[in-house]
Image (cartoon, rainbow, N blue to C red):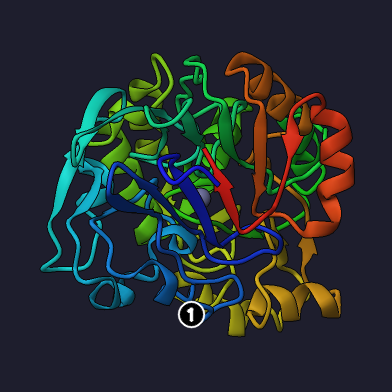
Amino acid sequence: MDQNRPLLRLISGVGKKGPACFAIEARGKRLVIDLGEGPPPGCLPDVAAIAPADALILSHGHKDHIGGLSLLAQLGNPPVYATEIVAGALPKGLTARTLPVQGMSEVLGIAVETGRNGHAPGGIWLNFTIGNGFLYTGDYSAESVLYAYDPPARASATALIDCSYSDYQRPLAESWSELATHLGKGPLLLPVPANGRGPEIALELMRHGLRDIFIDDAMRKALRQLADAAKVSLGDGLVQQIERLAQIAQPIDGPRGVMLAASADGASGATARLLPEFERSGEIAILFTGYINPNTPAERLSKSGRAQTMRWNVHPRLSDTVTLVRNVQARTVIPAFCDRDQLPKLSAALAPARVTMDAVVAI
Ligand SMILES: [Zn+2]
């Protein structure tokens, strides 16, 4: 390999589901991108090969992207970069240098373009002006009806892309149709992430005329943040709708209506408190709408048949991935957050781009 060519190291998150952690080495600096924990819960990346680091950059605030901050000392306590919204939710005592949700900035002298990822409050994709251009999408969605998405447009020869859904192709509108079949049959518990699809599903319920919407404290806090400090992450004209949703939604007080509560896997928060009682009742339906984390109540209840599962799209469909690869003219694509056995399908769909899961890629 050319000694002067920037390198991308895939530490975790490529080849099998796992915490996000990558590193780029360029111009004598090592930038670590994301430092997650799980899935499965407790799984941390092995950062020995990328220590010490000169900077840690966080794409968004989900656990599988920031839950590994306990490893910061192993990385030599580098400065942390994140958007103001993500920085505000980091563990106490940890300060971050601010990245814009949208626009150009610099990390250790390297110019970086960021844009909203359509996936989470304060969430961004990152486009580094190194080598022939390197795009990291983090988690993103081109379909969200709540979170704004700025499609990356700058040419990037190498792209590390969220392929959580591999070649899945059903549109988000069909997620709504499926969810609708679960409504009006009695109390329904929807365990959701409050800083992800939770507010989006609640918004869709309100838009479709449902008024029996009940939320936990985490959802209340998330709605408040979306209407205020995180409104930059909302799609156009949605602030008033979020404010109205916050007025309509009532606190969960016994089983009734549609109840949205965190955490999404039932392992903590209000769902962990509600589930022991709710799962024993034959009257209350439980519906999980995201990735089923191993070794969690979500896995136990869905495997036993007590809870039902469906997918509410929060990651790109294959057609979104194809569009993105074309738009940024990527010649090398690294699919993230899916298993290695998806490589042939993705290679076929993204040709003529080279699709690889090699541990080290020249950018
Ligand atoms: Zn995420």
Q: Nearer the viewer, residue 75 or 98?
A: 75
Coordinates of residue 73 in the picture (x, y in percent): 23, 77
Asked if 319 appears above or below 262 in the picture, the reply is above
Query: On the picture, is 271 further left or further right than 343?
Result: left
Is residue 249 shown to the viewer in this render? yes
**How far from the left and from the top, in percent, is residue 16?**
70, 64
Q: Amino acid at mark 1?
A: Arg
Decide which of 344, 249 is in the foreground and name it: 344
The local secondary structure at tag 1 comes to: helix
Is residue 168 at all visible to an observer of this figure? Answer: no
The image shows residue 44, relative to residue 173, as above or below, that is below
Q: Is residue 110 left or right of residue 95?
A: right
Question: Residue at 34% across / 48% down in the picture?
Answer: 222
Residue 316 lies, with reference to residue 265, above or below; the image says above
Counting every numbered tag in the picture gives 1
**Residue behind mark 1:** 273
